Amino acid sequence: MHKKPLLSLLLLLVSGAGFAQNTYPAGYFRSPVDTAIALAGNFGEIRPNHFHAGFDIKTNGKEGMPVYAVADGYISRIKISPYGYGKALYIRHPNGYTSVYGHLKSFGTGIADFSRKTQYFKESYEIDTLMDPELIPVKKGQLIGLSGNTGGSQGPHLHFEIRETATEMPLNPYLFGYKVPDNVPPRITTIVIYPIGEGSVNSRHIPKKIKVTYQKGKHSLLNKLDTVTVNGTIGFGIDTYDTENRSTGQNGVYSIELQSGGKRVYYHEMEKFSFENARYVNAHIDYAEKQKHNEKIQKCFLSKNNLLGIYKDVQNNGLLSFTDDSVHWIRYIVKDYAGNTSELMLKVKSRSKATATKEQETVTILNPALYFDCTKENKFSKEDVQVSIPANALYDDIQQFSYSRPSSVKGSFSPLHRIQNAETALQKAYTLSIRPNHLPDSLQPKACIVSVNEKGGKTYEGGSYKDGWVSTQTKSFGNFTVAVDTVPPRIRTAFKYLPKTTVDLSTAKTIGIIVSDNLSGIKKYRAKIDGNWVLCEYEFKKDLLFYTFDDSVERRVHTFEIEVTDDKGNAAVLMFSFKR
C-alpha cells in the first residue's frame, strides 16, 4: 500500500533534467520582472576570464522596465560603479539566499534617497555599502528599481543572480523553479582531439579540430569523417552552446559528459561555482584557441592547476590512454537545464605503436632552467627584464619558457620584451620589471609598462619607477615596453558654448561633460557647483560624465568646475558659468 507514494517520490527526484534542482526551494522566489523571462545570457555561460553568474533577462532592448524584489528580505548591499554591475542591489532573504539585481538605471524611491545621501556623505559616485537589516526592509513584489544599461553592460538588460548568503557562491537560477520555454537541444559545432605528452593524433603531435554539422535533429562530423587514428595519452574537447525558444543568442549548456566504450570518463554541470575560482574558466577552455580564433572549446580533461568545483565523476583527469590496436567509440552527451540532449559519436582507431613523422623525429632539447612547474614559484631574468610568477599562477607546466626581443616601439623607453606568448593563460598576476633606457629624472613618476599587440596598439598595464626599474603586476603574457604618460585627460562640454560667456542651462536637465584619456585612463574626478561638491555619474562606455539638476540649484548664475585626473596624476580642469 506504500508503493505508490514511494514511486511518486522517485519520479519527482529524477524528473526534468535529472539534476540537483530539487534540493532548492522552487517556488519561493517570484520573477524579478512582470514579463515572461527571455534570456540574453544564462548561468555558466563562458565570458572573458569568468563564468556568467546569473540570468541576463531581456528588457526589449530598452531601459526602464520595473524590477521587483523576488521575496521578502532587506537591502543588504548597495553598490554603484561605472564598471561591473553598474548600479546594483543585493537583497538578503531569511531562507539563506541573497538575490542580486545589476545594471539598473535607477533605484526605488527610498533606496535612491539612501544611496544619494551616502554618495554625498562620501563625496563619491562610486559606493559599496553594506546595510543593517532594519535600514531598508523590502517585501516580495515591491518595486526596487528600473532596468538599465549601467556598468559594463553591452546593452539594456537586467542581470539577476541568486547566491548562497553564507558562501556568496552564485547558484543557477533555474534551480529555483524559474521557467524559460525551451525545447531546443544544445548545438555542437566543433570537437577537438588533443595529443598529450608523447601522444599523437593521425601520427601528429598537434590537436585535430573537426567541424560538426547539424541536420534533421542530428549532429554528424563534417565531410563524413570516419576514423581518427590515435596513440598514447589523448584528451578531448567540444565547442557547444544552448539557446531557448525565445532566444537567438549562444548561451551556455548545463552539462557535458564524455564517454569511452559506454563508460563515463568526464562530467561537469553548472550548478554553482565560487567567484574566487571563476577565472579558472581559462583552464576549463582551450585558452590558446580562444585567443587565436575566438572559439570556446571546453576541454573534457583537467589542467594540472584547475580548482573549479563544477567537475563530477572525472576519471584520470578525463584523459584516455590508447595503446592497443582496436577501434574505440567516443560519445559526447550535452544537456541544457530543460533536459534537451544532444549526442555525437566519434570512432577512433588506437595504435599500439606511434607512426613516426618528420616532426616527431625532431627531438627538442629543453633547457631545464626554462621548465616552469605551475605548482611552484618561477623566475626569469635578463640584464634589463625580470619576471616573477607565483606558485599556482599558471594552469599547466610550461615546457620551455619563451623570451625574445622583437623590434622596438617608437617613443618607448626600453626594448620591446616578448614574455612567453599571449596564448598562455594565468590565474594570478605575476610581477614584471623592466629597466628603462634614457629615462629623464623628470619623467620617472610618469613611467609605466604597456603591452603592445601585433598591430602596434598599446594597452596600459600600470606600474611605477623605483631604483632603476619600472615594475607592475599583470595577468597576461605578450609584448611589453616602458612608456610615459604626461598628457592630461581631455575635457569638453557635451554642448556648445563660447568661452568666458555664461551658458543658458535654464531648461536643461543635465550638465554633460565628455572626457577621454590617451593612455593610463581616468582614475578620479571631482565636480563642484559654486565650490560645493556635486554628484556626477560616469558612463565610461560613452566617455560621459553628467550632473543631473535638482531643486537645490537656485534660479541664478552659477559656476561649474570639474577636475579629471588620470592614473599617472595628470589633471585637467574645466570651468564655466551657467544660468539656471
Image (tube, helix red, strand yellow):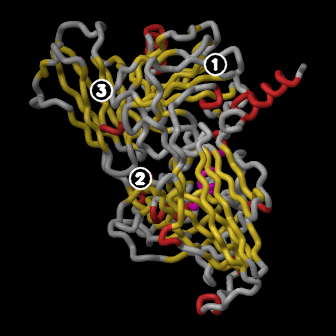
Q: Which quadrant holds the N terminus?
A: top right
Residue at image coords 71%, 38%: 18
Going by the numbered disc 3, the residue's amino acid type is: Phe
Q: Residues within 10 Å of mark 3 (few under 14, many from 20)?
A: some
Residue bearing the label numbered 1? 27
Q: Is residue 41 above or below residue 480?
A: above
Residue 460 at x, y percent in the picture:
43, 54
Going by the numbered disc 2, the residue's amino acid type is: Lys
Given residues 361 and 4, the one toward you in this image is: 4
Given residues 354 and 559, the one toward you in this image is: 354
What residue span does the magenta drawing correspond to?
A: 277-286
> Is there a contact, CB below 8 Å, between mark 1 and mark 3?
no
Residue bearing the label numbered 2? 446
Is 193 within the magenta? no
Relative placement, left or right, of 190 versus 538 is: right
> Looking at the image, is mark 2 or mark 3 earlier in the sequence?
2
- Tell me if I can see residue 126 in this picture: no
Residue at image coords 10%, 25%: 501
Relative placement, left or right, of 495 versus 569 is: left
Relative placement, left or right, of 371 versus 469 is: right
Q: Secondary structure at mark 2?
A: helix
Residue 327 at x, y percent in the picture:
71, 75
> Looking at the image, is mark 1 or mark 3 earlier in the sequence?
1
Quarter of the image where one finds residue 473: bottom right
> Is there a contact, CB below 8 Å, between mark 2 and mark 1?
no
Residue bearing the label numbered 3? 546
- Tell me if I can see residue 420 in this picture: yes
Residue 54 at x, y percent in the picture:
56, 34
Q: Which quadrant holds the C terminus?
A: top left
Q: Is residue 15 above or below residue 141?
A: below
